[in-house]
Image: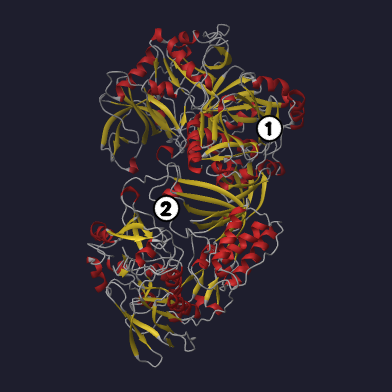
Amino acid sequence: MHDLIAITPMGATDARIDTIKGMKIAERPDFALASVAARAGRETDTVDAAKTGLGLDLPPAGRFVTHAPYAAFWTGPEQWLIEAPHDSHENLADLVKAALGDAASVTEQTDGWVRFDLEGAECHAVLELLCNADTRRMKAGDATRTQLEHMACFVACRTQDMRFSVTGARSSAASLHHALVTAAQSAL
Amino acid sequence: MIIHHPLLGPRDAQEFTFLGAATLIERPDWQAEDAQEQFHDYLHLRDNPAGEHRELWFHETGDRSWLVVTRNTLTHEITNVEMARDVARQKGRSK
Amino acid sequence: MTQPNRLSGGRIDTGTALTFSFDGVDYQGHPGDTLASALLANGVRLMGRSFKYHRPRGPLTSGSEEPNALVQLRTGARQEPNTRATTAELFDGLTAASQNRWPSLRFDALAINDRFSNFLTAGFYYKTFMWPATFWEKLYEPVIRRAAGLGSLTLQEDPDVYDKGFRHCDLLVIGSGPAGLSAALTAGRAGADVILVEEDFLFGGRLNAETYGLTDTSTQGWVAMVMSELESLPNVRCMSRTTLYGVFDHGIYGALERVSDHVAVPADGKPRQILWRIYARRAVLCAGAIERPIAFENNDRPGIMMAGAMRAYANRWAVTPARTVAVFTNNDDGHRTAVDLMAKGVGVAAVIDTREDAPKIAGCEILAGAQVIDTSGRLGLSSIKVRRADGKVQTISCGALGVSGGWNPNVHLTCHQRGRPVWNEAIAAFVPGGDGPPGLGVAGAANGAFSTAAALASGSTQALAALDDIGIKGRAIDLPRAEDAPLRISAYWHVPGGKGRGWLDQQNDVTVKDVKLAHQENFRSVEHLKRYTTLGMATDQGKTSNMGGLAIMAELTGKPIPEVGTTIYRPPYVPVAIAALGGRARGAHFHPTRKTPSHDWAAQRGATFVETGNWLRAQWFPVAGETSWRESVDREVRAVRGSVGVCDVTTLGKIDIQGTDGAVFLNRVYANAFAKLAVGKTRYGLMLREDGIAMDDGTTARLAEDHFVMTTTTANALAVYRHLEFARQCLWPDLDVQLISTTEAWAQYAVAGPNSRAVLHKIVDPEFSIDNESFPFMACGEITVCGGLRARLFRISFSGELAFEIAVPTRYGDALMRRIMDAGEEFNICPYGTEALGVMRIEKGHAAGNELNGTTTALNLGMGRMVSKKKDSIGSTASEREGLNRPDALRLVGIKPTDSSAKITAGAHLMNSEGPVDAAHDQGYVTSAAYSPVLNSAIGLAFLKDGANRMGETMRLVSPVTNDNTTVEVVSAHFVDPEGGRLRA
């Protein structure tokens, strides 16, 4: 085992958590990510292999599905992002590649992203100051990629009205965090 | 503007990057006898219609799809949106 | 303190007193007041000076269309010029000042302009300041600039914050008068997602200002009931203090919400304003109508206002501008003002009606067929002169005059996409032309339906039609009975005779005479009229004045009004602060900041950072005792070349390319050959645009048969990715290739210098050999480090030294940097920044962004032979164009001053050692310059005509900007280790 100490996208050893007037904004470094892109003409094979190997029904556009310990987002035509707990699945890309074989290209994406979870009764009021996603109409399992203060982000509805995750580029974690916190202070 | 993405539905044009006329899909054959002339036309000669125009938009902060958007340059009315990949295939592009 | 002109009743809280000041004098008002209503209550009619003639002015209206009563609100950094007193909500402690006057509002020195008004007519500037031409910049412009403008800026940073927001709805209802309330209620009950926006702080629109309205129930009671129902519906959002300022394409609406303008200071963390982008499937415009004046001599004195405004001040704000008033009208609506003011105990001296058949009002003198022909009162109205039907002139004492020339439907928003209103003779006004923005219906007075009953009915009907359009079934709602008086009006625009100083546009001081002058000088189209006279070009966009101007032009040209037409209406409907358009993207948050994995570590070491794109990169790492950046950078360069250094190169774009056709794909997007790159090898690639111009460069490593990792320059990472997706989706859609960016996923460090291998030996796990034989120059591989962490190693070099780039998952980047520093301690490892990186790449002759500047080809860069002619790649055909291959084409060379202490400036141009120094004799230019601590001399990279054949030539390097004139020698761009022995060591 190596002895290098990991830091979170916010630059600390522990995840950043803020609570603003009942709204919890939590950094979530505890997920591993791997992207899946079906090889040319192999979309069906990819979907079948994901089902067999990971138990996942790869979702259609605008959706994500969960099948513990995995979850999968649609990210583009014939492309998905697979999510799993980091502690148990740090080598997620290898696991996914093993399951999908030559049907798909798999790329490690774990540290490409920062994810913040928003939890509270006023999620819509905060998110409407940040992005054009119509979060009021999103149901659990809806996910969309859009921009938030000039940053491309995935906005996913985890629990309708109550819990959303915002996933953006890791390098701008501090800017994304600032945007979320100031929006919460403004809206609540 | 709102662009009706074939897969994602209505999306704000803020999420897209514009490239130019959809004729950019029709890249000439480099081995044609008059390849120089064809590339010249491909690169530099475009229609600039006052009216319906087919153009390429990239869903930059979305799903990274290239789209062919048919837009009226006078009214901004968008009458058709297609996946550029499908258009390219229809035009006989392959490998 | 007394408020001499305060009446009883009104929708204000008289139980609470608010103290405010205007021009240093304290007054009192009440919650519910605007600044204008509170000043009027205190007997203050004079609120400002006009733009050009500095005429004394008071409020003309009671709403956002106000041209006159513009004040500076607040003090200090929050001071805002040109705020309309008619919409500024009163709060305790509000401070306002008049503007465009000196030394005081009552005595204004520049009022002298008014005496010279014969010279200052329309076109004055165009005619007067034409010559001599040199006078413009030195004399005319500074003088005019000093005199111009209304309020002034503080030049202090705005302490407030502004938000942007996004909302979605099925139906957007714009305005909450009878039409808006009826539309919102209809749609709300149908279950549609509704947003109701109201510019005012009170919902109800004109219903708040009138005594007429509903006939069998209390008007105020009904408004309260509807609002309470709307606010209880979860599918309806009611936004007051929100102005819909623009209609954009495809159902996107811009709205400005004034969240904190009605309080002294925004609450902690709260924005002053929010700029909303509303996505509405359908919308109904219920923006009402705007009353228009009649022009007559001296119709701009404080106290002269719109009759409907006078009525609103009395009914809603319990205020009268004077104890005795008169009314001048061409329609029945004006009579309502007289009736309402009399009911409030205000004396009405007379109603002057231009119509012979004017109706009667009990207890009030009606002068039918009469006109107001002049007025008196230096700083406020004291009397009016009336020409009666019998031709006799009568003077009537009054402190205020309500004027009604009829009402213009508020068509503004229907024209934001070039819709043109059409003339409706029955109401003598323009109404929406039906060619408005798709999805935007119009109801109520905005559509010419002026009675309350018609407004209520059309609001509901329009809402149902809009919902039906989007598949939502609704039902007509029960509407209260309301007045349904027909409109009786006889068009009347200006009182003829006199000197022609009847004001049309009171903000820009445009008179009837100016329109006549424009006509005389043949500026007759409305667009010309507007620009020649500046009619309607002020901050109020001529909401009260444009109609009069074009009616007079119609009269002069003998054309019907619809033929003269209207000018184009454009957003914003009301002024919008730039700060609101900027939102949170301001100062340090203007754009997102991207930080490298070693950022905190670098900051702890005191690094100086530079912004490259959105990234912050360490520029150099000063150590104790160093006094200039050059000292630090020279030390860093010497350390790398002498032993070993480490640099964070994470910012370079990384694109993961997989698929069975990956090699084919790379072979087409790079100009040089890639098909045969072996697994475990890295190759430099030059990417061209299709026109043959260099786009980007970088290295691409082949990790497996079907797996490549491409690097791009930091600045071009996004553009290259977009370009590759274009190639993949649009040019070769059936290639088996998949792309994804991994820039952020890997922390990557360059470890460079003769001791770099020794340092890495302590990092890389022993099962991976990195000696020169098993891991030669341009090798790459997946390895583990520090006891098992997955990593990637590339033997590539930007510095020209023996060098490696090592990558680990980003979360371990901070720890790896610290580990490398520890491992390198025995070799005096030195962290280096982008400056040293730049110096070393110039010493090595490596092209970078300065050379790939969007005008240069592979040939220019000295890589012409790399462009393979045996394959098709993007840009290969066009790069063979004759013009790009001239014998004297620019070539990349190095230059060195003959005097080693001389400087080289990037951007300077090369001239032959003899001959003229001018653009015609230009030989090339310097793209990059640096001081080389290795050569102890300034060095530069330059593009020089036929440069490859001019080695050793002496030239002059000149720059007219910096007055450089340096003698330089043309040398190879490879200043250091031209054979490349060091990087292969």
Above or below residue C117? Residue C172 is: above
Q: Which residue is mark 1?
A: C735
Q: Is residue C246 left or right of residue C385?
A: right
Q: Quadrant of residue A2?
A: top right
Q: Indicate which label's residue lies in the foreground, 1 or 2.
A: 2
In terms of secondary structure, where does tag 2 sit?
Answer: loop
Residue with the most extreme bottom position? C390
- Within 10 angstroms of label 2, few (less than 14), some, or many (20 or more) residues? some
- Give whichever of C461, B78 is nearer the camera: C461
Q: Secondary structure at mark 1?
A: loop
Q: Nearer the viewer, residue B60 or C889?
A: B60
Within 10 Å of disc 1 (Cα), the crowding (few <14, some 14-19, many 20+) is many
Q: CA distance from mark 1 to mark 2?
A: 58 Å
Residue ranking furthest to the front = C15
Which quadrant holds the N terminus of chain C?
bottom left
Residue C688 visible: no
Q: Determine if marks 1 and 2 fall on one subunit.
A: yes
In the rendered image, the vertical position of residue C677 relative to residue C360, given as above or below: above
| Residue at screen point 34% across, 89% down | C393
* Up-down relation of residue C203 to residue C637 (above or below): below
- Which of the two labelled residues, at mark 1 and mark 2, occupies the earlier sequence position? 2
Residue B51, horizontal then vertical, whole percent: 60, 58
Q: What is the x, y in percent for residue C725?
A: 61, 36
Marker disc for residue C261: 2
Closer to the camera in the image, B35 or C718:
C718
Amino acid, disc 2: Asp
**Taking the image as drawn, is residue A2 in sight?**
yes
